Image: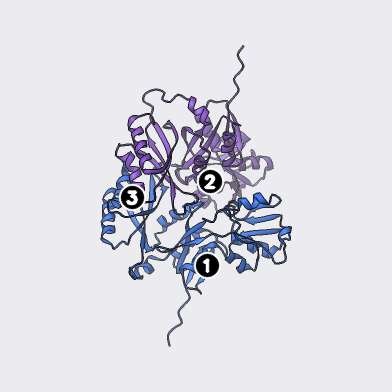
Chain colours: A blue, B purple
Amino acid sequence: MSRPRRRERIAFQGERGAFSEEAIGRLLDPGVDVLPCQRFEDVFHHLKENKVDGAVIPIENTLAGSVYENYDHLQKFELPIVAETKVRIVHNLIAAPGVRYSKIRRVFSHPVALDQCRHFFARNPHIEKVTFYDTAGSVKMIMEQRPPDAAAIASTVAAYTYGGHILRRSIEDDRQNFTRFFLLRTPAYASRMPRRKGRGIQWKTSLVFTTRNIPGALFRCLASFALRDINLTKIESRPLRGKPWEYLFYLDFLGHIEELNVRNALGHLAEIADMTRVLGCYPRGD
Amino acid sequence: MSRPRRRERIAFQGERGAFSEEAIGRLLDPGVDVLPCQRFEDVFHHLKENKVDGAVIPIENTLAGSVYENYDHLQKFELPIVAETKVRIVHNLIAAPGVRYSKIRRVFSHPVALDQCRHFFARNPHIEKVTFYDTAGSVKMIMEQRPPDAAAIASTVAAYTYGGHILRRSIEDDRQNFTRFFLLRTPAYASRMPRRKGRGIQWKTSLVFTTRNIPGALFRCLASFALRDINLTKIESRPLRGKPWEYLFYLDFLGHIEELNVRNALGHLAEIADMTRVLGCYPRGD
C-alpha cells in the first residue's frame, strides 16, 4: 500500500484571505495547506529552513510599485523563483452581515488599500478612513468585534474566508491595479523540476547583478541583452550595503537560461559585471 | 528706508528636529523659518501654492533605498530641484533628563530607525521596540509624557530641540547610513537663480523619461549618455499609471544642461524616448 502523499504547505505574508492567498490559488493545485506569516522575512525563513514546501510573495504592483523589501530578501535568502502570476486587485467594502451601508461611518484597511479608494472616500466625506495592518485582517477584526458603524476594504476571498458581507464591489479608483507574485521553492526542489515543458511556453528569467563603478557600466551590462535582441521586462535598483551610492540591479527578461543567446548574454554579462546571479527561470505568467 | 527682508520659510515632512531639518541647516542660511508638515504630499502642496519659499525632501537612503513616494511627487508637482545634500544618519538613544539607562525597558521610534539599530536590541533583549510615527516625534512624546522606563531613537538635533538627554550616541548598526535630500523651489524662483556659478563646481542633472514599448528601449535611451561619456549616478524606475507593466525612469547624471554634450544627449534622448523632462540641474552635494 502506498503512503498517502502529504499535502504541500505554502507560506505567505498576511492574514487568511490576503491577495497572496488568491495568488496561491492561481499558482498551485487546490487543496494545498497555507501558512500565514506576519512578516515577509518570516515567509523566507520558513522556506529556507524547509518548514514549508514553497512561498508566495508579491513583487510588484502596477500602482504602488515594487515590493522593495522582497527584492532584498530574494538576494539574501537565495530561494529560486519557479513561477509567477498576476492578480487583479479588486477592493470591496465588506461589513458584518446585518450592517447596512447607510450606517457606515468608519472603514478599516491597510493604508495602501485606503489610498487606492480615494474616489470612494471623496464621494463619502462622512466616512472616516482608519488604517489597519492588513486588508484581510481588517475583515477578520470587524467579524470578531461586529462594530455597527464600521466596514473593511479587502478582497472577495477575505469576505468569503470570514463570512463578511460585500456592501460595495470594486471600489478601487483604478482598475489597472495588478500585483505580480512569485512562487519560491528550495534550491533542492527547483533542481528536480522539469526545465522546459512544452513548446509554445514563453519563459522569463530574473537575475541580480552589480556593476563596476565606472562610467557607462550599466549601459555595458544592458548591452549583453540588447545586442542579442533579448527583451527586458523590468529593471529595479536597490542600494548596495556597505557601498554608499552604489546599487544592485535586478533584471527580468524574456528567455530561458538554456537558450543559446541567453547563455551567451549571461556569459557576456559575467565578463563586465562585478557579480551576477540568476534568481530563477520560470514560465511567463498570463 | 528699505523694507526688512522677510525670512524665508522652508517646508519639510516630520516633527521639528527631523533629519530633514538637519538637511535644511546644510542647504540654507541659518535663520530660515521652517514649516513641519505631516505628509510629503503636504510639503509639495505648500510649495506648489507658494505658501513657502522652498521645500526639503529626502530622496534616498544608502540602506533603505529610495523614498519612492517622493519620486512620484517630483513627477506630478513639477517643482524644480535646485540643490542636494547628504546627511549622515546618526541614531541616538534619548530619554528625559533624570531617566537612567539601566531603567530603560521600552524604546520608541520610527520602524526604519528601530530596524537600523538591530544590534543594540540584540544586546539588550530586555528592551522592547515600540513603533512610533516619527523619530523626532518620539522624543517630543517622551519629553511631554516623561515615562520613567522609556527612551526614543532620533537625531542629535531632535535631542537639542526638545531638551532630551542623549544616553547612548550613534547606536545604529551601520555607519554607512546616509540620506540624500533635495531642495525644491518654485519654477519662478528657480528661473531667477544663477545658472552657473564659478568654475570647479561639479553639476548634476535629474530627469524623468518613459521609453517606447519596444525591445532594447531602455538600452537605447542610456546610449544617449554613454556614447557621450556622461556618467550616470542613479537610475530609478516607477510604475507608469494606466499602463500596467510599463515604467517611468528617473536618471541622475553628472553634467550641466548648458554643456554642449549634455544638450546633445538630451536631444538624442528626446528622439527615442516617449516623454522626457528635466527635474533640475544643481551643484553636486559633498
Residue displayed at 36% across by 25% down = B200
Q: Kindly identify which residue carries mark 2.
A: B113
Please state which amino acid type lies under the numbered disc 2. Ala
Q: Position of residue A38 (x, y in %)?
A: 55, 60
Q: Between disc 2 and disc 3, whose residue precedes?
A: 2
Q: Which type of secondary structure does the marked residue at label 2 adopt?
A: helix
- Using the rendered view, name the quadrant where residue B249 is placed: top left
Foreground: A227 or A265? A227
Q: Mark 1 points at which residue?
A: A35
Residue depicted at x 55% and y 26%? B30
Residue A4 vertical position relative to residue A144 in the rendered view, above or below: below
Q: Are marks 2 and 1 in contact (CB under 8 Å)?
A: no
Q: Residues within 10 Å of mark 2 (few under 14, many from 20)?
A: many
- Residue B275 position within the rendered picture, expressed as x and y whole percent measured from the top left: 43, 42
Label 3 resides on the chain identified as: B
Mark 1 touching mark 3, by CB under 8 A? no
Q: Which chain carries label 1?
A: A
- Name the element at disc 1: strand
Closer to the camera: disc 2 or disc 1? Answer: 1
* Residue ID at (43%, 38%): B207
Give the image location of residue A74, x and y in percent: 42, 57
Which residue is identified by label 3?
A: B216
